[in-house]
Image (tube, rainbow, N blue to C red):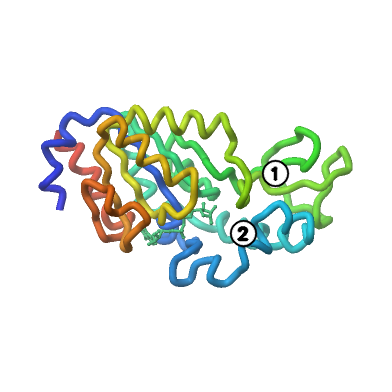
Amino acid sequence: MFESIKDQIKNVKKIVFVTGAGISQESGIPTFRGKDGLWRNYDAMKLATIDAFYENPRLVWEWYNERRKNIFSAHPNNGHKAIAELEKLRDVVVLTQNIDGLHQKAGSSKVLELHGSIVKIKCTVCDFIDEMMTDFSESPPLCKCGNILRPDVVWFGEALPQDVWQKAIIHANQCDLMIIAGTSLAVSPANTLPMYAKQNNALLIEINPENTEMSSEMDLIIRNTSANILPEFISLFKEN
Ligand code: APR
């Protein structure tokens, strides 16, 4: 399946992966819009917006506590591991929409978390931000300044962390090859990253069992799962 691109990837130096919930699906973490996706069972507008948080912070905290338990018990799969391994052969950067930290757990060293991280918390008022070390006794937990703490993730209608986003655009604009794995590309601005890569004439490859919002823009589409395909794909670079 890679025959058509073997020659093109010979000269690839910088590779950027854009990943989403699908790459962690085989680690037991549900996607958002897939068959048993979270947004099929929960109302995103009741759980993942700042208004929903202020309306019922206890509910939102309980939901993130459940997700955190699921994520903390998950392990990187062959998809995450293959990307980490490729770092030994090429300049690799991961731009992920995932908040689960599994790329880093697999050993990837250059990971930009576009939508934040479930292990981090921040104050809704002061500039306190930290890793969540223990479970809180009270819900919602309070900051030492007395205001409520929130998960350090990006909710619908919120801007991405600007320093992270600016760096992501630069990496996308500099890459020779962009692999879009496990994301529906339904959410912006992350779904504009392939366009930045295209501006640099990068090769675009989509790894996803299903069509995405931008399948028509891709140079190569592989309708399979990331844990199945990525180890095989990485082996191409060992040959070169
Ligand atoms: N391997 C590869 N792709 C997969 C796999 C798999 N094993 N399983 C599912 N997929 C694909 C699905 O076909 C789908 O296209 O992964 C994609 C997951 O899409 P979404 O559920 O929309 O998740 P994502 O693209 O990460 O969502 C973006 O939306 O809800 C917000 O902030 C949240 O970061 C998230 C953003």
Identified at 61% across, 60% down, the residue is: 67
Question: Residue 65, position in %: x, y?
Answer: 67, 58
Q: Is residue 70 above or below residue 78?
A: below
- Amino acid type, mark 1: Ile
Identified at 52% across, 46% down, the residue is: 101
Q: Is residue 232 above or below residue 47?
A: above
* Quarter-of-image position of residue 138: bottom right
Q: Which mark is residue 121?
A: 1
Question: Residue 44, position in %: x, y?
Answer: 61, 62
Question: Residue 187, position in %: x, y?
Answer: 49, 51
Identified at 47% across, 63% down, the residue is: 28
Q: Which mark is residue 186?
A: none
Q: Residues within 10 Å of mark 2 (few under 14, many from 20)?
A: few
Q: Is residue 155 left or right of residue 172?
A: right
Instruction: Give the SS element for disc 2.
Output: helix
Q: Which mark is residue 69?
A: 2
Viewer-proximal residue among 203 and 145: 203
Between the residue at mark 2 and the residue at mark 1, the CA separation in whole angstroms equals 15 Å
- Amino acid type, mark 2: Lys
Q: Is residue 119 left or right of residue 232?
A: right
Viewer-proximal residue among 107 and 99: 99
* Quarter-of-image position of residue 184: bottom left
Quadrant location of the C terminus? top left
Query: Is ligand 1 closer than 8 angstroms to the Cβ of mark 1?
Result: no
Q: Is residue 84 above or below residue 174?
A: below
> Ligand 1 is found in which quarter of the picture?
bottom left
* Quarter-of-image position of residue 110: top left
